[in-house]
Amino acid sequence: MQAIRELYKIGKGPSSSHTLAPERACRYFAETYGAYPYYQAELFGSLSLTGKGHRTDEIIRETLPGETEIIFSLHWQEKFPNGFYLRALDDNKKIVHTWTVFSLGGGSIQIKEHPLDWNDEIYSEKSLAEIMQYCKAEKKTFCDYIYAHEPGLHAYLGDILEAMISCVERGLHTEGILPGRLHMERSAKHLYDHACIAEKSDQKNLKLMAFAYAASEENAAGHTCVTAPTLGACGVMASYMYYCAEILHIDKDHLIDALAVGGLFGNLIKANATISGAVGGCQAEVGAAVSMTAASCAYLLGLDQEQIEYAAEIGMEHNLGLTCDPVMGYVMIPCIERNAMGVLRAADSAQLSKYMSSIRRHLISFDLVVKTMNDTGKQIPIELKETSEGGLAKEYDGQK
């Protein structure tokens, strides 16, 4: 597996695969070859089909230091479904350099012609079963295991935690209309106001959902958020971390450890399946976010490794088959609401694990449900994988 720091990344929304990944690739392209007067970016897959709604063309033009032509194409010759050709052209508009860039999900990229050291694998274990076997034999916790492989991770995750908290805080205090043709009004502040005066029994859930709305609306506005594991699913983990920090006043170091544990599970999903909506549907984004957050929640509840595994498994299992069908190509409907529901499902997963673990042994392992998610993603039609050609995106006609 790659480093967990390659899972959690700070970047501008609304989509890690459509904005953060192209931005990273274009910046690195310019750093590698220097400035050229002209560029071409030929987009394929969901980058082409929903690139306009996701601001892909804007972020590429903003990042490259020359006049840039954006080409939206459909005939992609590469095996991975989501990517673009990036070309630098000289004064005579002759192509000098070309990269084939794959947008892997969560802002991660792979360049066919140029290996990246941040994609190096630093964890030798390939599955949770192997990790748990190692930890049991060596009497290590998940955090012991993680920090032994990534010594500087704790400090890095401190910055990630602060970015999550800042994102939610901004979203809670911002009103207005989100950009795009949907003309959606921000709702996080109003939902939080309702939560503060609601019946006691409703307050926790309403606050969690308001926090998820806050982060997701910041993402939809193109502002700075954290991939967890993607920007489209950023509200799930950010909501829970904000609630723990600002409402429960849990120690920062404890929350950083919880992020590390959640990141371990997200990393396993990324390595053994996918976190890309264009590859696996929204089960790979919000489903993975719920699974990660469930693991973090279980850790904060003081559950043991088997119970943490069960919580993460529940979180993924009950998102199997979830499609990605953003209306008009914007990360708004159903994405924002889905993040709000996701954080509740994550908390429910940890609670169910806590009590069911004393009743019977669970039969479905985390590794098995990740494999199932990957297989399920391959069976989801392309129209329901971030192309906006099916599902709600097809049925919604813009009428209110």
Image: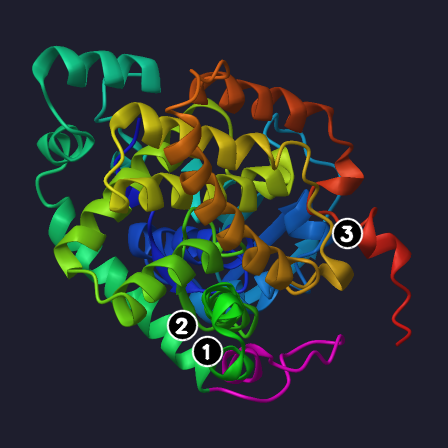
Q: Earlier in the sequence, mark 2 or mark 3?
A: 2
Please state which of residues 250 and 322 is positioned toward the viewer in this rendering. Answer: 250
Mark 1 or 3: the one toward you: 1
Marks 2/1: CA–CA distance: 5 Å
Mark 2 or 3: the one toward you: 2
Identified by mark 1, the residue type is: Gly
Vertical side of 356 occupied by 387: above or below: below
Dot 1 falls on a residue whose secondary structure is helix
Measuring from the top left, give residue 45's x and y in whole percent: 68, 42
Checking the image for residue 168, the label placed there is 2
Checking the image for residue 344, the label placed there is none
Residue, disc 3: 388
* Residue 189 falls within the magenta-colored stretch: yes
* Residue 69 falls within the magenta-colored stretch: no
Measuring from the top left, give residue 155's x and y in whole percent: 12, 54
| Colouring of the image | rainbow
Q: Earlier in the sequence, mark 1 or mark 3?
A: 1
Residue range of the region highlighted in magenta in the rendering: 174-193
- Determine contact: label 1, label 3, CB under 8 Å: no
- Give the residue drawn at x 37%, y 78%: 169
- Give the residue drawn at x 30%, y 56%: 31
Dot 3 falls on a residue whose secondary structure is loop
Which quarter of the image is occupied by the C terminus? bottom right
Identified by mark 2, the residue type is: Val
- Determine contact: label 2, label 1, CB under 8 Å: yes
**Residues packed near mark 3 inside 10 Å, few (<14), some (14 to 19) or many (20 plus):** many
Residue, disc 1: 171
Which quarter of the image is occupied by the N terminus? top left
Vertical side of 26 occupied by 7: above or below: above
Measuring from the top left, give residue 314's x and y in whole percent: 50, 32
Q: Which quadrant would residue 381 be assigned to in this image? A: top right
Please state which of residues 222 and 93 is positioned toward the viewer in this rendering. Answer: 222
